[in-house]
Image (spheres, rainbow, N blue to C red):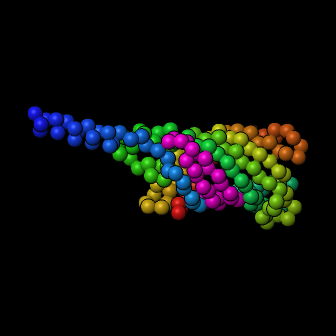
Amino acid sequence: MIRILLSLTLCALTCIGYAQDASVEKSINGIQVGFLGAWAHREMKLSNEVALRIELGMDAGGWSGNYTPKSSFAMVPVLTLEPRWYYNLNKRASKSKDISRNSANFFTLQTSYHPDWFVISNNKSVRVNEQISIIPTWGIRRNLGKNFNYEAGIGIGYRHVIPNGVFRSIDPNIHLRIGYQF
């Protein structure tokens, strides 16, 4: 009888030990590069599934057309604030998949501010108006080894140009980034 009780107690303690909910990391710092820019970021835990991401970087773009004599390229600073809901952490953990460094699928409300501080371009006449964009986005993050990761996302939202005070356009967000976490 004592052996049975001891066995049941050990089984119960083992189950309780593994019944913990998966959670986002307390804090993550890193850098990412993508096809259209480079960014430094910090993610801070708000709850078990929600993290607040703060990002500072350079967004890039290019264009050519009848109004310019040559193809142009520009990089502008961007400040981004986005709460991220990592909605499948528990599912990934239950399947013994890696959830370290917030390796999961997420929904976010990406809010970006492009200030009119400076522009790096091969065309001296390029200027960027101050603007804010708000884009609901779905994405994934997965780890590549110990410190590297990749991230992909897609979303659509609005861009608000501050000087004239109107919604200027619908703004897509398609990104693919490779990063390093410290």
Give the residue drawn at x 51%, y 41%. Answer: 49
Labels in figure, total:
0
Q: Is residue 171 visible?
A: no
Magenta span includes 181: no
Magenta span includes 36: yes
Measuring from the top left, give residue 133's x and y in whole percent.
74, 44
Give the residue drawn at x 69%, y 50%. Answer: 80
Please give the range of residues in magenta.
32-58
Measuring from the top left, give residue 41's x and y in whole percent.
62, 56
The image shows residue 91, relative to residue 81, as above or below, that is above
How would you classify the magenta stretch by its main secondary structure? Answer: strand
Instruction: Indicate left or right for 142 with 6 as reference.
Output: right
Quarter-of-image position of residue 17: top left
Image quadrant holding the N terminus, namely top left
Instruction: Indicate left or right for 127 with 38 as reference.
Output: right
Measuring from the top left, give residue 144's x and y in whole percent.
45, 58
Measuring from the top left, give residue 120's x and y in whole percent.
78, 64
Q: Is residue 156 visible?
A: yes
As drawn, the residue found furthest toward the right would be 164
Instruction: Indicate left or right for 95 with 53 as reference.
Output: left
